[in-house]
Amino acid sequence: MESVAQKVMLSGFALDLGPLKEPLAFIRLLEWVFSIFAFATTAGYSGTTSFNIQCAGSSSSLPEVHAEFNYPFRLPDHAFDVPDCKPNGTTTSTFYLTGDHASSAQFFVCVGVLAFIYCTATIVLYLGYQHLYRETSRGPTVDLLLTAAFAFLWLTSSSAWAKGLTDVKYATSPDTLVSVLDICKGNTCTPGAVPHMGRLNASVIFGFLNLILWGGNCWFIYKETPFHKTSNQPADTEGGPRPM
């Protein structure tokens, strides 16, 4: 029996853009685009949070304190120096952001990258090897199972990352830093710039949009499988009376 790779090599590539007019390939193209948006808006992100300190008994504020963080949001790895309110004003203490949210962020990005790779492969299959895809029931059946698996992965990864992002926002909020630092308990600390999270908010939206696309596409792939075709066939195809 020929393997799938051998069949692909022997069948020959025949480009046909016709399937893009059908929901099966068109939705897969949308999945390809939105999977890129999902992981690209998360990976490579970097942000900065800040606050100001005014020492007790002093009329002037110390230089603004900045704390930087980035993907994969392993926040304890990011240190920032806080000036001490001492007469010479030259010493600093090192503090660290709190909370490790790398697992949810990396899981989300991993699902996005795998979905992108799978979409690329299936788009090539739809447009160049459509005859091979419909030759047997194996292609649509495997496609249905993998698409359903990705829909579940988008559900779990998007939910986990949405919770992780909420925790990242809280841990990096200037109000949170001001409330937990010991130096702010005896001196006046004011929140500074709030990190720009619009890009990360968009990543969560793209994650759930992918869930809708992959879940909805299961129906159109299901219509290509023998399960749907068998259920639509009439119970009695003979046309004559059934034997007693």
Image: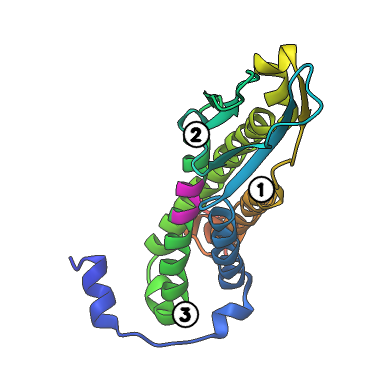
Q: Is residue 234 something one can see in this rendering?
A: no
Left or right: where does residue 132 sit relative to residue 197?
Answer: left
Please tell me in which quadrant of the rendered image residue 29 appears. Answer: bottom right
**Which residue in the protein does label 3 denote?**
127
Label 3 to label 1: alpha-carbon separation: 27 Å
* Nearest to the observer: residue 225 or residue 63: 63
Q: How crowded is mark 2: few (under 14 residues within 10 Å), some or many (20 or more)?
A: some
Which mark is in front, 2 or 1? 2
Which mark is in front, 3 or 1? 1
Magenta residues, as a range? 109-113
Three-letter code, disc 2? His
Q: Which residue lies furthest to the left in this view?
A: 1
Please tell me in which quadrant of the rendered image residue 221 appears. Answer: bottom right
Label 2 to label 3: alpha-carbon separation: 47 Å
**The N terminus lies in quadrant:** bottom left
**Which residue in the protein does label 2 denote?**
78
Question: Residue drawn 47% across and 41% down?
Answer: 107
- Mark seen at residue 208: 1
